[in-house]
Image (spheres, helix red, strand yellow):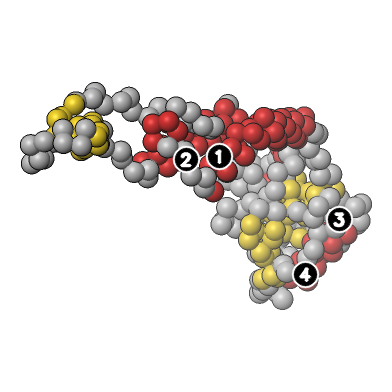
């Protein structure tokens, strides 16, 4: 379709230029002849034959046909208006007409090549980054405060399936990703997270139903110990802006944030730009 449009526009442009070129030629006035009765000679005169001497005998001749359109090459116009003077436009027009098959071939090959590349790109398999999970380290555990025992009546505790939906990974190209491979985005919020003593990182996903219960840091590991806990925010999908150690259920020391940055670094994530926001508790 694009090829036909291109050729149509080219033809319209050539025809328009050709007609514009004809408009620039002088207009020839139709004329007839008159016979001088004194000298018996015939001379041309212009219309209207007014105010001529009385010895002129007017012979009216019908006007000749208008010059036919010209599109490459000489024609009857030469006999009506005289030979055409060569100019750069005529030379260019004749060259374009002569090279039209070549132009069409080049255009065809260009569109065919572009279409082939698009089809090849559509069928080319997309490389999916590998997701890197916990490296198997054993971090110092931090237990939940005793006053929160028995809270599962009002606080949701995740099972293995729900926990798996909340786990974060580092992709092979260095981004923080969710379990489905998409880059994690906090959306401008500060969702809570925990990291298990084995190095698994969990963060709440809005798609998970809480069944009318409250979400707490203790929800992810069902009240079991963590390596650190707090809040996280991304500056853009897959890139962490800051983390903190704010958790009333575990009250982790701010030094535990280093266990999280160490775990991320071991998986290949660049932690140099992560801001560590320290939270202090009464005991520290």
Residue at left offset 85%, top offset 58%: 268
- Which callout, 1 or 2, points at the residue further toward the start of the chain? 2
Q: Is residue 125 above or below residue 193?
A: above
Image mark count: 4
Residue at left offset 58%, top offset 37%: 94
Q: Label 2 vs label 3: CA separation? A: 80 Å
- Give the percent coordinates (x, y) of residue 1: 58, 26
- Which callout, 2 or 3, points at the residue further toward the start of the chain? 2
Callout 4 touching callout 3 (CB < 8 Å)? no
Q: Which residue is mark 1?
A: 93
- Give the class, few, some or many, for how many residues have Cα within 10 Å of label 4's Cα (few <14, many ≥20): few
Q: 157 or 36, which is in the foreground?
A: 36
- Give the class, few, some or many, for how many residues have Cα within 10 Å of label 3's Cα (few <14, many ≥20): some
Q: Which residue is mark 3?
A: 267
Residue at left offset 76%, top offset 60%: 228
The quadrant holding residue 246 is bottom right
Which residue is outermost to the front? 39
Element marked by disc 3 = loop
Element marked by disc 1 = helix
Answer whether residue 80 is visible to the viewer in this image: yes
Check residue 84 in the rendering and tell me which mark sits there, or answer none.
2
Answer whether residue 161 is visible to the viewer in this image: no
- Which callout, 4 or 3, points at the residue further toward the start of the chain? 3
The quadrant holding residue 67 is top left
Depth check, mark 2 against mark 3: the one in front is: 2
- Give the class, few, some or many, for how many residues have Cα within 10 Å of label 2's Cα (few <14, many ≥20): few
- Give the percent coordinates (x, y) of residue 147: 66, 57
Q: Label 1 vs label 2: CA separation? A: 14 Å
Q: Label 4 vs label 1: CA separation? A: 65 Å
Residue at left offset 40%, top offset 27%: 68
Check residue 272 in the rendering and tell me which mark sits there, or answer none.
4
Q: Is residue 258 above or below residue 214?
A: below
């Amino acid at each position: 379709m694009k090829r036909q449009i291109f050729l149509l526009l080219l033809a319209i442009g050539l025809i328009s230029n050709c007609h514009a070129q004809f408009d620039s030629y002088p207009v020839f006035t139709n004329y007839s002849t008159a016979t001088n009765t004194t000298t018996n000679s015939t001379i041309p005169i212009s219309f209207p034959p007014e105010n001529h001497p009385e010895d002129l005998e007017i012979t009216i001749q019908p006007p000749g046909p208008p010059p036919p359109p010209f599109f490459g090459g000489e024609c009857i116009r030469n006999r009506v208006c005289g030979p055409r003077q060569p100019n750069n436009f005529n030379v260019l027009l004749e060259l374009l007409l002569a090279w039209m098959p070549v132009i069409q071939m080049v255009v065809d090959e260009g569109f065919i090549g572009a279409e082939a590349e698009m089809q090849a790109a559509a069928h080319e398999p997309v490389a999916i980054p590998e997701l890197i999970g916990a490296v198997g380290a054993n971090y110092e555990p931090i237990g939940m405060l005793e006053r929160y025992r028995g809270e599962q009546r009002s606080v949701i505790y995740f099972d293995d399936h729900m926990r798996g939906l909340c786990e974060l990974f580092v992709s092979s190209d260095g981004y923080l990703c969710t379990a489905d491979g998409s880059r994690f985005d906090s959306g401008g919020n500060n969702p809570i997270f925990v990291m298990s003593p084995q190095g698994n990182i969990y963060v709440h996903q809005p798609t998970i139903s809480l069944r009318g219960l409250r979400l707490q840091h203790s929800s992810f590991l069902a009240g079991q110990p963590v390596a650190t806990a707090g809040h996280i925010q991304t500056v853009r999908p897959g890139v962490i802006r800051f983390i903190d150690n704010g958790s009333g259920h575990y009250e982790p020391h701010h030094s535990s944030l280093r266990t999280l940055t160490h775990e991320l670094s071991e998986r290949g994530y660049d932690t140099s730009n992560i801001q560590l926001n320290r939270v202090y508790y009464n005991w520290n």
